[in-house]
Image (tube, grey):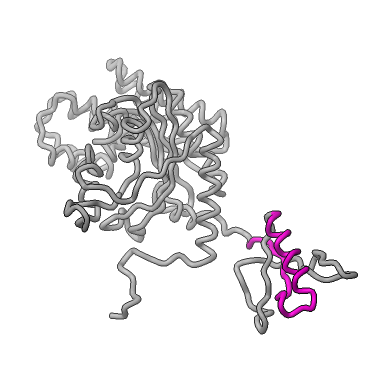
Amino acid sequence: MSAWVLPDHIADVLPSEARHIEELRRELLDTARSYGYELVMPPQLEYLESLLTGTGQALDLQTFKLVDQLSGRTMGLRADTTPQVARIDAHLLNREGVTRLCYCGPVLHTAPAKPHATREPLQLGAEMYGHAGAEADLEVLLLAIDCLQRAGVQHMTVDLADARLVRSMLAGVMATPEQLEQVHAALAAKDAAALAHLTASFPAASRDGLATLVQLYGDEKVLVEAEKAFQANKTSREQLSNLKQLASQVKSVYPQVSISFDLADSRGYAYYTGVRFAVYCPGATDALARGGRYDEVGSVFGRNRPAVGFSLDVKELVGVVPARALKAAIRAPWPEQTPQGASLRAAVHALRARGETVVCVLPGHEHEVQEFTCDRALVEAAGQWVVKAI
């Protein structure tokens, strides 16, 4: 094997894609900042017991582990940033009231999360702590849509669910963790036959409720059917009413966005505690952004307060949005090849200080293609260096 062959699902990012990723990263963080979210930068590496505090087995299996040469303790490379941000909110900031935090950085996975996925996503996210109301759910969802829209995503569909609907159907059911995991997998796959088999020994109310939920996915008509099916359950009716109101508010702000519902969607069932959402678009094999309410995320850090947020992979996002035009630049001669080299260098410096990109052409490389569009040239005119269109 060649020494330069990279591991499976790990890849170099070449100039054009890297430029697009970096431009998106800046724009998305600026979008979060425009909503009042403060940037944090958790470490990529932590002691394992700290990194995995409160996380499930799935995240443990996705975490690369290594031994710290200084302390001899086991360390882990983060596979998800949200638990770290929850720790920052609980222990380092410890503020009263609402805290809005955002982040963007690489995470590492021991295995790809889905087919053809990278094991080194660039995870961007935003988290709000301290507000239990539906207003927080709405703000985070609007921010996610705004981020995707500014990235160039079109024809978005927002899929809404509420983790409490499935939880209420499973309340009081005596089942092992393995059985519950299989039930949630059957719900996610819409496998009614497998669900019926798995729930055969469940109480009738739970069995029938789950069987009804697995059929409830689609457009707004789903909520009408759900309200009829659960009209005797006051808690479920309230949760359905909240989803209806959230969908209405999103449509009032983004009328072009489609809304769908999947009331049996229980992915992340051990994590989400309320409203949850996923945003899809044509051409993407899976959701571009996922988020929702996870009020219990801070409990392991001794501060169990309301929390809601979303995350996305910037690398994946680049693959489904239109390619961007090359950055406009100014072409300039190589200063040492001109009699007025000092004044040329001063002119180039002044242009770069104003934010312009100036490419000085090296001798013998006048016609090479670069990651810029040189639509102007720095030329000498009457003893002065001036910019002219090409």
Whole-percent x and y of residue 113?
30, 53
Whole-percent x and y of residue 253?
57, 30
User: Can you say whether 32 is above or below 303 in the image?
Assistant: below
Asked if the stretch drawn in magenta spans residue 95, the answer is: no
Task: Name the outermost residue toward the right.
Answer: 382
Whether residue 288 is visible = no
Residue located 19% across and 52% down the image: 71
Residue located 54% across and 58% down the image: 20
Left or right placement of residue 299 versus residue 122 in this view: left
In this rendered view, identify the residue nearer to me: 144 or 307: 307
Quadrant position of residue 196: top left
Asked if the stretch drawn in magenta spans residue 336, the answer is: yes
Task: Name the outermost residue toward the front.
Answer: 342
Look at the image and tell me in which quarter the N terminus lies: bottom left
Residue located 28% across and 39% down the image: 268
Whole-percent x and y of residue 120?
36, 57
Residue located 14% across and 24% down the image: 172
Quadrant position of residue 215: top left
Part of the protein shown in magenta: 326-354
Whole-percent x and y of residue 339?
79, 78
User: Can you say whether 20 is above or below 239 in the image?
Assistant: below
User: Can you say whether 140 is above or below 230 in the image?
Assistant: below
In this rendered view, identify the residue nearer to me: 335 or 292: 335
In this rendered view, identify the residue nearer to me: 131 or 147: 131
User: Can you say whether 238 is above or below 91 in the image?
Assistant: above
Whether residue 68 is visible = yes
Left or right placement of residue 215 versus residue 130 in this view: left
Left or right placement of residue 328 versus residue 194 in this view: right
